[in-house]
């Protein structure tokens, strides 16, 4: 209800002096918020700001008829959402074409100048923030709606969550002179220091840290409870002004200047370039200075500055022709190897891992890097104490690229792989022809058991929420579990006896375990941790045998002849199910009520169809969405190809969306996917 409508309701009216005080407080708070969150130049202390905010809260509590949507008190005022409404963008939020080197960028520049017939062309160069793209709509100067990018045509309404972003203005500075309607586009991101703090907290809680700022920002924006989003110090950087009724802009740089004056945070690093050489100078400068930025940036965006020239150049179905993203090469950093340790995986594989002096790489502090296996360790000749160069493969997994042998002092120590398991002491074997050495301890090795339990309860397997490494270590140390079936025998008394476990937390753990008793067959097969059996192979086996007893009794030939399996996987599967320990585990799982769900529908709505997912879904987890497909007889694919029938698109989709459009694959947003698969979650 608007403030005007509220004021027309029966009841006492606030005196004019009080109204003036409320408006004065709001004006002060907006001014100081802009100084603090946008300009980084506060004029008053935090205590003074909090006192102004508290006075405003008290006055609005006494006179609720004075509350308005753009009041600073309303940044966290919405109840948790059941789901996010779909929002169709006023203009498509297209992807950008990429250039990965200067030659590709030069070719783009030649195409632009040729298409414009020799006209003089000016450009803007901007840093490409590593975050989540959003569309923000203001009506008469007041923030009205915000949405994720989604599939570029339709996103999700995250207005309540965006209100919690302190650098996002709820009301433009010159409200009276603001367009009746204006849409701006920007990037929601987490400063690197905030990302570090959140990741430390997640690691301490036994959770997986965010791989980068983009994942953290997208995950934070799509929390159903705005109060959760508010606890993350998200920031906004506006990079585009879209529709602005009654306010024509001749150039992109002019539009950004207006946005800055209106109160939007706009990067100070936007630079106009009159030539290709100036574009290159900007890129080279920030390629060198990238590590000094307080936020993640993965490239530079170059845009034609003239709005008329942008219109003349137009766009393809996927991207505007007048803009391009130059992607920085994978960032490398120098650090030192403190120690080399061996990790034991669930299949007994021994992996050497370098403990590093902490160093920031592509926005994340790296403390460990994989050395893969003994052969790789020897090939790179990594020694304890070495100065090394590290990078994040695919900007996710840290790895040692090379050793800086010229910096060796003679104090470095070679590392030898152990002959016995460092955890259980069992002999280590390395089969002929394999690169990986393995512990032979099996179920008697605590490290293998812990890794198996973590794998069994992971999101892709039985998805047992809240049962992470810290809790599992306690259960193992106290002798309460020895295999996955033992999880289902836990009592509340046993769980309550664990460290830092309250009554409600114990109930939540037991409820999550209980929900896992009826997994999809593919999830259970994957969760067993069979060597060479990833989720895709588990799905293929489940679709073919459709029954755990049938799979466990299958011969080598029967498994080998399943399309897409082959002899190596078949040998591993048959050997696993022939083990006495496996037969004991399956009997124990059946005894505690763990039974796979019924067979997928052969004549289901998606029978014979292949569905691929990209981006982050809002109302379903990826596992829940995939289970819907399989329950209707469909297959979940990993990549988009000519046999893909549907691509389901969530927030911040990847390159799969572009490929689907090129191949003519049907693209579904989450709402249409829900309609196709039976309605609400």
Image (tube, grey):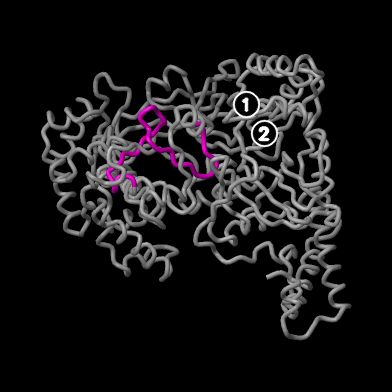
Tell me which residue sits at (54%, 55%) in the image.
Answer: 85
Q: Position of residue 631 (x, y in %)?
A: 29, 48
The answer to which image quadrant residue 493 occupies is bottom left
- In the rendered image, the quadrant that contains the N terminus is bottom right
Q: Nearer the viewer, residue 636 or 356?
A: 636
Residue 120 magenta-drawn?
A: no
Q: Is residue 104 or residue 552 the one in the foreground?
A: 104
Residue that mark 2 sits on:
128
**Element class at badge 2:** strand
Q: Position of residue 8 (x, y in %)?
A: 75, 78
Label 1 close to label 2 by CB (< 8 Å):
yes
Decide: is 626 above or below 349. Answer: below
Q: Secondary structure at mark 1?
A: strand
Image position, residue 223 (x, y; %)? 54, 55
> What residue lies at 47% left-to-right and 32% top-to-bottom?
656
What crowding class fits label 1: few (fewer than 14 Cα within 10 Å), some (14-19), or many (20 or more)?
A: some
* Residue drawn at point x = 50 percent, y = 48 percent: 203
Label 1, label 2: how many angstroms apart (C-alpha)?
Answer: 9 Å
* Corner quadrant of residue 557: top left
Q: Is 215 left or right of 576, judged from the image as shown?
A: right
List the residue tagged with mark 1. 327
Q: Nearer the viewer, residue 225 or 676?
A: 676
Percent position of residue 524, x then y: 26, 47
Q: Which residues are magenta?
A: 629-655
Left or right of 277: which side holds 592? left
| Marker count (numbered) | 2
Write down the quadrant of residue 239 in the picture. Answer: top right
Residue 652 visible in image: yes
In the rendered view, does 557 fall on the left or right side of 71?
left
């Amino acid at each position: 209800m608007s403030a005007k409508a509220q004021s027309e309701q029966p009841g006492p009216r606030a005196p004019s002096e009080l109204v003036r005080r409320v408006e004065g407080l709001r004006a002060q708070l907006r001014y100081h918020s802009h100084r603090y969150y946008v300009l980084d130049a506060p004029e008053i202390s935090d205590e003074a700001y909090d006192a102004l905010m508290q006075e405003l809260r008290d006055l609005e509590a006494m006179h609720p008829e004075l509350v308005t949507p753009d009041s600073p008190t309303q940044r966290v005022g919405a109840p948790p959402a059941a789901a996010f409404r779909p929002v169709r963008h006023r203009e498509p939020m297209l992807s950008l074409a990429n250039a990965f080197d200067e030659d590709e960028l030069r070719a783009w520049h030649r195409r632009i100048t040729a298409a414009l017939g020799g006209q003089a062309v000016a450009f803007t160069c901007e840093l490409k923030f590593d975050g989540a793209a959003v569309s923000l709509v203001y009506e008469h100067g007041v923030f009205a709606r915000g949405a994720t990018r989604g599939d570029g045509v339709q996103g999700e309404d995250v207005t309540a969550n965006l209100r919690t972003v302190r650098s996002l203005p709820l009301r433009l500075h010159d409200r009276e002179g603001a367009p009746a309607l204006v849409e701006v586009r920007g990037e929601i991101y987490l400063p690197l220091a905030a990302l570090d703090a959140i990741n430390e907290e997640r690691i301490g809680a036994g959770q997986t840290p965010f791989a980068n700022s983009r994942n953290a920002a997208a995950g934070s924006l799509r929390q159903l409870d705005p109060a959760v989003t508010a606890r993350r110090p998200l920031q906004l950087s506006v990079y585009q002004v879209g529709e602005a009724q009654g306010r024509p802009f001749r150039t992109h740089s002019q539009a950004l200047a207006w946005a800055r004056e209106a109160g939007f945070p706009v990067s100070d690093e936007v630079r106009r370039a009159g030539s290709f050489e100036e574009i290159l100078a900007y890129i080279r400068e920030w390629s060198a200075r990238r590590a000094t930025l307080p936020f993640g940036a993965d490239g530079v965006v170059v845009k034609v500055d003239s709005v008329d020239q942008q219109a003349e150049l137009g766009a393809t179905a996927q991207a505007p022709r007048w803009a391009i993203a130059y992607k920085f090469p994978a960032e490398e950093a120098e650090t030192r190897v403190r120690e080399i340790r061996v990790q034991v995986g669930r299949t007994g594989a021994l992996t050497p891992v370098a403990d590093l002096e902490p160093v920031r790489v592509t926005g994340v502090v790296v403390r460990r890097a994989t050395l893969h296996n003994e052969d790789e360790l020897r090939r790179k000749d990594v020694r304890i104490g070495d100065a090394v160069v590290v990078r994040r493969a695919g900007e996710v997994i840290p790895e040692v690229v090379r050793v800086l042998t010229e910096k060796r002092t003679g104090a470095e120590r070679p590392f030898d792989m152990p002959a016995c398991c460092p955890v259980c002491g069992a002999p280590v074997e390395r089969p002929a022809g394999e690169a990986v050495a393995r512990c032979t301890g099996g179920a008697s090795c605590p490290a293998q058991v812990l890794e198996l339990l973590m794998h069994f309860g992971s999101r892709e397997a039985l998805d047992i929420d809240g049962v992470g490494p810290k809790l599992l270590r306690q259960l193992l140390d106290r002798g309460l579990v020895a295999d996955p079936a033992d999880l289902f025998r836990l009592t509340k008394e046993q769980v309550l006896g664990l460290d830092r476990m309250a009554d409600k937390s114990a109930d939540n753990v037991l409820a999550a375990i209980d929900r896992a008793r009826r997994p999809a067959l593919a999830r259970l097969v994957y969760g067993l941790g069979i060597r060479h059996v990833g989720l895709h192979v588990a799905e293929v086996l489940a679709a073919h045998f459709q029954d755990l007893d049938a799979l466990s009794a299958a011969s080598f030939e029967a498994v080998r002849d399943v399309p897409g399996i082959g002899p190596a996987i078949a040998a591993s599967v048959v050997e696993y199910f022939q083990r006495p320990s496996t037969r004991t585990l399956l009997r124990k799982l059946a005894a505690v009520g763990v039974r796979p769900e019924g067979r997928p529908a052969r004549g289901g709505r998606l029978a014979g169809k292949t569905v691929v997912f990209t981006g982050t879904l809002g109302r379903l987890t990826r596992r829940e969405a995939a289970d819907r497909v399989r329950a209707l007889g469909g297959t979940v694919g990993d990549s988009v190809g000519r046999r893909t029938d549907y691509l389901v698109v969530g927030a911040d989709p990847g390159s799969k969306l572009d490929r689907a459009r090129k191949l003519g694959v049907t693209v579904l947003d989450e709402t249409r996917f829900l309609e196709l698969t039976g309605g609400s979650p």
